[in-house]
Amino acid sequence: MNRFLVAVTIGLMASTGAQAGVTEDDLANDQTITSQVVTNGMGRHLQRYSPLDTLNKDNVQNLVPAWAFSLGGEKQRGQETQPLIYDGVMYITGSYSRLYAIDVQTGDELWQYDARLPEGILPCCDVVNRGAAIYGDNIYFGTLDARIVALNLKTGDVVWNKKIADYKAGYSYTAAPLIVNGLVITGNSGGEFGIVGEVQARDAETGELVWTRPVIEGHMGTLNGQESTMTGTLNATWPGDMWKTGGGATWLGGSYDGETDTLVFGAGNPAPWNSWLRDAGEPKDDNSGDNLYAASRLGIDPATGEIKWHFQTTPREGWDYDGVNEVVAFTDAQGNKRFATADRNGFFYVLNREDGAFVSATPFVKDISWAEGIDDTGRPIFVEENRPGNPAEAADGGKGETIFASPSFLGGKNWMPMAFSQRTGLFYVPSNEWGMDIWNEPVTYKRGAAYLGSGFTIKPNYEDHIGSLKAIDPTTGEWVWEFKNDAPLWGGVMTTAGGLVFTGTPEGKFIAFDDETGEELWSFQTGSGIVGQPVTWEMNGEQYVSVVSGWGGAVPLWGGEVAKKVTYLNQGGMVWTFRLPKQLASAN
Ligand code: CA
C-alpha cells in the first residue's frame, strides 16, 4: 500500500507541473500521503488519523527513541505544538514565538527563527504556540504580538511579516494557520480583553489581506480592501454598544471541509464574562441576550469570507464556555457526512456537514450542572440557578451570588485536539472532570485590560482523577472506554490504522492505547508534561512517531486549586522522535 501511495504522489506532482514546494494537492491529500505531514491536524478536516499500519498493536512494544531535540535556553515552558514533516525536515514551533527546522533523520538543528517580541504583550493563557503551516516554499506561523510571519523553508529568512491586530489592545496569536487555495487563514486571540474575534485571509505569496470576517454581529467584513457585508444584524442579540467589545476570539484557528468547500472556525466567549451585562431583556423569555456569534461555530466561504451557517453551542454564555473547539469532518457508520465537536460546555455535538444543522448532543463529561441537556433544536436547557448571580442585585452592588458550576471554565475539553479513527468509527476525546466556584462582579471596558467581571476557583470533581480520555461513539454518544489520569489532560490525540491511539499526560508519559479496549500497550517517560500533539509518518520503509514534551499552558496559570495540586510537574522543552526498526516490525 505504501509503495502505491508513493507512486500516486509522484503522479500528482507530475500532473501539477513545475510548482515548487507544497501544493494545494499536497494539503488536500495530507492524510493519505504518509511520507509527510504538511497540515495541522494531519489533514485539514483535523481527524488526526494515519492510514499507516506498519506500527500496530502487535509490535508497538518495539517502538524505540530515534532522537531527541531540546528547545533550549530558559524558554522551556508550554510546548503545545504539532510537528510538520516535509522534504527531510521537521518543523516545530516553540513557546515565545520560535520556529525550528530539524534534520528529520538525525535530529540536528538546521535553523531557528526567534520572533522579536515587544514589551507589553498580553497572552492570556501562557506563551504557547500550536503550530505552523506550509505552502509553496514558505512556512507560516503566528506570534504572541498578533503577527503572521512567512519564512523561507530552506533558510528561515523572513519572506513577509504582517500585523493581524494590535497587541496593545490585548490581541495575540497562538493557533496554527490554515492554508486553502493559496490563502493563509488565521483567527485571533484575546477574548479576556474585550477584543473582537475575526477571521482573516491573506495571499500566501504576498501577505496582502484578501478578506476579513469579524464574528460578532454589527461589525463589517471586508473583501479586497472594500467593505463587504455586516456580520449578523446590529443589536439583534446584543444590547447597546456591548457588541463593540464583544469578544468571540477565534483563537484556536479552523478546519476545512473540501467536500462542501467550507472553512469552519469557532468563536470564544462573549466579553465580558458577566452575562447580565450582555442581556437587554428578560433572558428566560427571548433570545435577545444570545450574543451571536460568540460561543458558536461558523461555516465560512473561503473565497469571500461570507458566513454560510452558524451553530451556537452556548447562547447567553456566562461560564467562559468558548465555542472554539475544533470541528472535525467525518463520515458516520451509516454513511452520513457529519461534523463533530466536543465543546468546552461538556457536550459532544454532531452537526450536518452541508449546513451546520444540529444532529445530536450528548455529555462527554460527568456532572454537567449548567444545563439539563440540549433540546432537539440544539439549544441548551438551562439550569437558571446555575448561572452566576447578577452583581446589580447584590445588596452592596459588589459580588453577585457565587455558584458551583461544572465543567470548569477550562472546559470539559479545552484546546487539545481529539482524534477520529476511520478504523473504529470512534472519537477519542481528551477531557477533564472538574468544576469551579464562579461569581460575577461589576466591570467596565478599558483598552488592553482584562475584561471579565468574574472571579473563579477551579476544583477537581473527583479525588482520584481529573483527566479522562474517552472513546466515544458519535452516533450514540456512548462511552466505549475511558482512561483516567491524575492530572488534567492537556495534549493532543492521534489514531492510526494500526489500531493505536496516542496521547501524552502532564506527568510526562507518552502512551499508545488499544483503540478498541483502551488497554495501555506502550509508554515512554519524556521527562516533562506532554501538552503537544503527536504525529506519525513513514521514512526509509519504517514508521516514525513524534511528540513535543514541555509542561505549561493555561492550567498552571488559571487552574486554582488544581494548579496547586500539580505544582510538582516539571517544565521542559524537547521533541521526542520514535521509530519502529524494520527488523522488529514483524516481531512481537
Ligand atoms: Ca475564554
Image (tube, grey):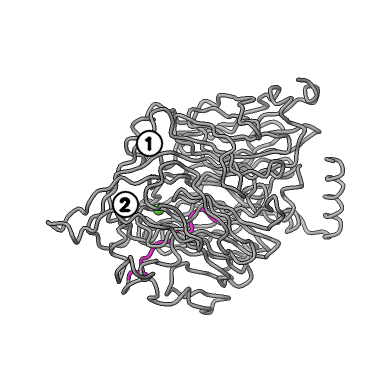
Left or right position of 423 against 285: right
Left or right position of 239 against 577: left
Left or right position of 45 against 457: right
Per the picture, the main secondary structure of the magenta-coloured stretch is: loop
Q: Vertical placement of 357 versus 481: above or below?
A: below
Q: Secondary structure at mark 2?
A: helix
Q: Amino acid at mark 1?
A: Asn
> At 39% across and 66% down in the image, what residue appears?
290
Whole-percent x, y for residue 518 in the image? 61, 31
Whole-percent x, y for residue 505 in the image? 51, 32
**Quarter residue 275 falls in:** bottom left
Q: Earlier in the sequence, mark 1 or mark 2?
A: 2
Q: Vertical placement of 542 versus 237: above or below?
A: above
Report the disc number at residue 385: none
Q: CA distance from mark 1 to mark 2?
A: 16 Å
Residue 449 among magenta residues: no
> At 29% across and 69% down in the image, what residue appears?
282
The residue carrying mark 1 is 461
Whole-percent x, y for residue 300 in the image? 58, 67
What stretch of residues is rendered in magenta? Answer: 242-253
Q: Amino acid at mark 2?
A: Asn
Q: Residues within 10 Å of mark 2 (few under 14, many from 20)?
A: some
Residue 248 among magenta residues: yes
The residue carrying mark 2 is 386
Q: Nearer the viewer, residue 535 or 318?
A: 318
> At 56% across and 68% down in the image, what residue appears?
309
Whole-percent x, y for residue 467 in the image? 47, 35
Q: Nearer the viewer, residue 520 or 71?
A: 520
